[in-house]
């Protein structure tokens, strides 16, 4: 889902982290943890950036088995149905609420996560985790619209452009039900939070009208499509759009005038864990000011970590795609968990649209 921001920042990242991340030994790791995260959603060491996982392994002599998923739904299904034992996962707001309700998350022992003090006050408790017991915010952002200036002659104003017949065959759409349905609902005057089956029917009908205009449904494939000038329009996560714009000067963005999804992704420990204290050690490491700063710079996403935010360059803080104004955020919505029958209905109806 999420990717590096720009090579221009990498020298600064290395310079600011050299002292902090002095390695400690190269013996064979005695312990290991399994981290399950979105694709392209952690600083990897590419282009001179911080190798987040590598530095953790060197410092603590703990091996990290790191794997990816493309959507909350994929993560949930693997967590629910597989025999894999994950120690740290990074789901989004509504999915965290669902996991809490289904007793699939461990409460975090914050005595083992002292760096949680770095989290901004507004993110310490949330609607999806009201007591702040099960999750620690990792990043946040909004869904925006990316477009190719050489293919789209008039700057779009909102997501309605994704139904514009002038761009038939050059439009991309989310390949996950919650984001795709939400865009359709918002354009139909429905607030995409606690939705009903009737709301889903309305959205599904609108998405069916869009389908003949689409080139394809995408998640991480959006990078290849947009960076390679292979599509004209794509809704996607703001941090990833910032990356794509860095890699292709033909790209620009729009914050949809109707508002959009404000998402918060957080670190959690699933009940499947066999290494809870090691998982808490990893979460605490990710919350260190320099680590969180380097990770935020690489990803291009908004950080909920005040200590990291204070270290960011002003040009990043002033980027309205990454840190939209409060006025714009007030027009945005955050997903809530849906009753199981409504959730299943949404999944099934989206599959029908795609078939």
Image (cartoon, rainbow, N blue to C red):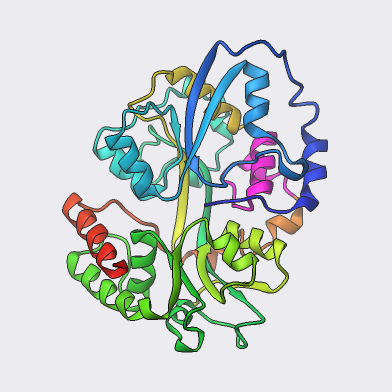
- The answer to which of 41 and 70 lies nearer the viewer is 70
| 92 relative position to 195: left or right | right
Q: Is residue 104 magenta?
A: no
Q: Is residue 242 above or below residue 14?
A: below
- By secondary structure, the bulk of the magenta-drawn segment is best described as helix
Q: Is residue 112 above or below residue 145?
A: above
| 291 relative position to 87: left or right | right
Residue under the image location 56 percent in, 32 percent down? 117
Q: Is residue 297 magenta?
A: yes
Q: Is residue 277 above or below residue 282?
A: above
Residue 21 lies in quadrant: top right
Q: Is residue 170 above or below residue 87?
A: below
- The answer to which of 61 and 312 lies nearer the viewer is 61
- The answer to which of 224 and 199 lies nearer the viewer is 224
| Residue 117 visible here | yes
Residue 249 lies in quadrant: bottom right
| Residue 331 visible here | no
Residue under the image location 47 percent in, 24 percent down? 110
Magenta part of the chain = 289-312
Where residue 85 sits in the image (x, y, percent)?
38, 26
Residue under the image location 66 percent in, 72 percent down? 251
């Amino acid at each position: 889902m999420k990717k590096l921001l720009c090579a221009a920042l990498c020298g600064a990242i290395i310079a600011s982290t050299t002292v902090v991340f002095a390695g400690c030994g190269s013996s064979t790791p005695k312990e290991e943890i399994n981290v399950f995260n979105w694709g392209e959603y952690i600083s990897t060491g590419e282009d001179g950036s911080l190798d987040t996982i590598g530095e953790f392994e060197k410092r603590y002599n703990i091996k990290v088995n790191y794997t990816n998923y493309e959507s909350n739904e994929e993560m949930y299904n693997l967590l629910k149905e597989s025999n894999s034992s994950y120690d740290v996962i990074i789901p989004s707001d509504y999915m965290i609420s669902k996991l809490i309700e289904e007793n699939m998350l461990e409460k975090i022992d914050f005595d083992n996560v002292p760096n949680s003090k770095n989290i901004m006050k507004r993110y310490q408790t949330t609607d999806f985790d009201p007591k702040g017991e099960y999750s620690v915010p990792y990043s946040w952002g909004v869904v925006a619209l990316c477009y190719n200036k050489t293919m789209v002659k008039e700057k779009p104003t909102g997501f309605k452009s994704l139904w514009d017949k002038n761009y038939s065959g050059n439009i991309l759409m989310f390949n996950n039900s919650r984001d795709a349905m939400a865009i359709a609902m918002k354009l139909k005057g429905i607030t995409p939070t606690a939705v009903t089956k009737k709301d889903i029917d309305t959205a599904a009908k609108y998405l069916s009208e869009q389908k003949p205009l689409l080139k394809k449904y995408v998640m991480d494939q959006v990078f290849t499509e947009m960076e390679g000038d292979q599509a004209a329009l794509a809704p996607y996560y703001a941090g990833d759009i910032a990356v794509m714009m860095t890699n292709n000067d033909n790209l620009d963005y729009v914050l949809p005038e109707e508002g959009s999804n404000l998402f918060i992704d957080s670190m959690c420990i699933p009940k499947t864990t066999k290494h809870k204290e090691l998982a808490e050690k990893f979460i605490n490491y990710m919350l260190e000011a320099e680590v969180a700063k380097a990770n935020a710079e690489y990803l291009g996403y908004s950080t909920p970590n005040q200590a990291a935010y204070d270290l960011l360059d002003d040009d990043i803080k002033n980027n309205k795609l990454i840190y939209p104004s409060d006025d714009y955020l007030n027009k945005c919505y955050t997903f809530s968990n849906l009753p199981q029958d409504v959730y299943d209905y949404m999944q099934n109806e989206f599959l029908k649209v795609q078939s």
